[in-house]
Image: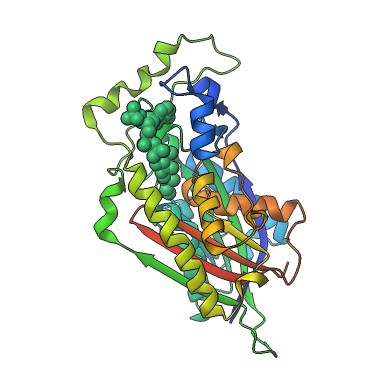
């Protein structure tokens, strides 16, 4: 059975933290961050929780799909930065949007989380468990990040994206495959990108328009607590970079082989938005025009599981996705995990 994307939605926190402001907090520069990553600014949650962002994205996706919340049979949320260990984000979103008929659970596959949620929803549809599924990627990465560590804090941002999926079609008169999925893990490389459970960071101490300017030294006061616990995100940037540039093209080729689709026939490759250089390298290795790789990390940074659905929502709202277009979604991140899904846009 096929699964169609009937609607998309996104929500990011109000507060924008640009590279220049960040340069007053840690020893970095706009130039360094832009050239190494393609990131210029990111949204940082001040009052918004992961569930606030997730529920807002979910409501927009339902509106875009023209569907009432009570029609949802399942909600799957991907997150690794929720404020609550339990209940899950999906359960809390269910209450917020009153999706009273949905069964709900979370997935933690870090930056590959949205791909894992999408593939799980497809499997659930095929198992006859749910025909209308809301999938969400929602993160408050600012609560996992050490705001004194310049090698990581410049990379991440907060946000949530969602998609409403409907099972249907399947009366495929042609031999053409409409979907294919691959997902991989190498747990031995988990040490290259990890974070202890339990939120320890209160996030960067940011001044808002209504509060007084704070001197730069105070901006990191809120991180003092982290020094004693050491429980924040750590990454070996080089290892993760090398892993991503090798495995992402590999799994894209694998999923297209499974789908029996030529790489030249794909309209868009919607990749996890961790780093411009990783995406440029993937395009080069695949021999595909970089214009087929839309990017938005400049405005958001790496939002982990929220990156792909937020980019998908932007393309959808900009009218860039037309029925029949062939798309590849690909994610990679902690685990280490990586995966790709091939689909045909039908909305
Ligand atoms: N600002 C200024 N200098 C910085 C810096 C920052 N924010 N972060 C690190 N540096 C410094 C380092 O201390 C180092 O200085 P040194 O040469 O004096 O020791 C220098 O810049 C080079 O550091 P290096 O780590 O070699 O940089 P890099 O070219 O490997 O780029 C990353 C670092 C993180 C941008 C890169 O490794 C990367 O993109 N990795 C993948 C990360 C990722 O996408 N993770 C998420 C996957 S889901």
Query: Compared with residue 77, is residue 273 higher up or lower down, i.e. above or below?
Result: above
Left or right: residue 10 versus residue 109 is right
Return the residue nearer the eye: 3 or 284.
Answer: 284
Judge by depth and name the residue closer to the eye, 143 or 19: 19
Give coordinates of residue 204: x percent, y percent: 43, 25
Q: Can residue 196 be seen at all in this image of the molecule?
A: yes
- In the depicted structure, whether residue 134 falls above or below residue 275: below
Residue 95 place in picture, x, y as percent:
52, 52
Which residue is situated farthest in the left direction here?
228
Left or right, residue 181 beside residue 69:
left
Quarter of the image that includes the N terminus: bottom right
x, y (%) of residue 276? Answer: 54, 45
- Image quarter of the C terminus: bottom right
Count the labels in the image. Answer: 0
Q: Is residue 48 visible?
A: no
Image-quadrant location for residue 109: bottom left
Q: Residue at the location (43% across, 19% down)? A: 25
- Work out whether 120 lies above or below 12: below
- Picture coordinates of residue 117 (x, y %)? 48, 63
- Picture colour scheme: rainbow
Q: Is residue 230 left or right of residue 177?
A: left
Image position of 292 with respect to 324: above or below: above
Residue at screen point 49% across, 50% down? 278
Q: Quadrant of ligand 1?
A: top left
């Amino acid at each position: 059975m096929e699964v169609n994307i009937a609607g998309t939605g996104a929500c990011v926190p109000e507060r924008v933290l640009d590279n220049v402001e960040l340069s007053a907090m840690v020893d970095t520069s706009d130039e360094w961050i832009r050239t190494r990553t393609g990131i210029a600014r990111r949204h940082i949650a001040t009052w918004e929780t992961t569930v606030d962002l997730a529920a807002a994205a979910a409501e927009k996706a339902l509106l875009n799909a023209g569907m009432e919340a009570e029609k949802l049979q399942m909600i799957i949320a991907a997150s690794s930065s929720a404020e609550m260990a339990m209940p899950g984000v999906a359960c809390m979103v269910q209450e917020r949007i009153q999706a009273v008929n949905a069964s709900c659970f979370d997935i933690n596959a870090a930056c590959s989380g949205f791909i894992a949620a999408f593939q799980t929803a497809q499997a659930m549809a095929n198992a006859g468990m749910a025909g209308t599924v809301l999938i969400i990627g929602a993160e408050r990465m600012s609560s996992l990040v050490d705001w004194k560590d310049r090698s990581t804090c410049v990379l991440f941002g907060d946000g949530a994206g969602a998609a409403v999926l409907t099972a249907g079609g399947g009366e495929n008169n042609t031999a053409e495959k409409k979907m294919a999925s691959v997902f991989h893990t190498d747990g031995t490389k988990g040490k290259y990108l990890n974070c202890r459970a339990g939120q320890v960071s209160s996030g960067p101490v940011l001044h808002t328009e209504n509060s007084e300017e704070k001197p730069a030294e105070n901006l990191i006061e809120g991180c003092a607590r982290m020094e004693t616990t050491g429980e924040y995100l750590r990454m070996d940037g080089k290892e993760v970079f090398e892993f991503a540039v090798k495995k992402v093209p590999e799994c894209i080729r694998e999923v297209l082989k499974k789908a029996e689709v030529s790489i030249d026939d794909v309209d868009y490759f919607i990749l996890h938005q961790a780093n411009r250089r990783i995406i440029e390298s993937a395009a080069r290795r695949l021999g595909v025009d970089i214009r087929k790789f839309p990017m938005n990390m400049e405005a958001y940074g790496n939002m982990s599981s929220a990156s792909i659905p937020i980019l998908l929502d932007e393309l959808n709202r900009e009218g860039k996705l037309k029925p029949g277009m062939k798309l590849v979604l690909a994610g990679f991140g902690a685990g280490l995990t990586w995966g790709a899904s091939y689909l045909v846009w039908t909305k």
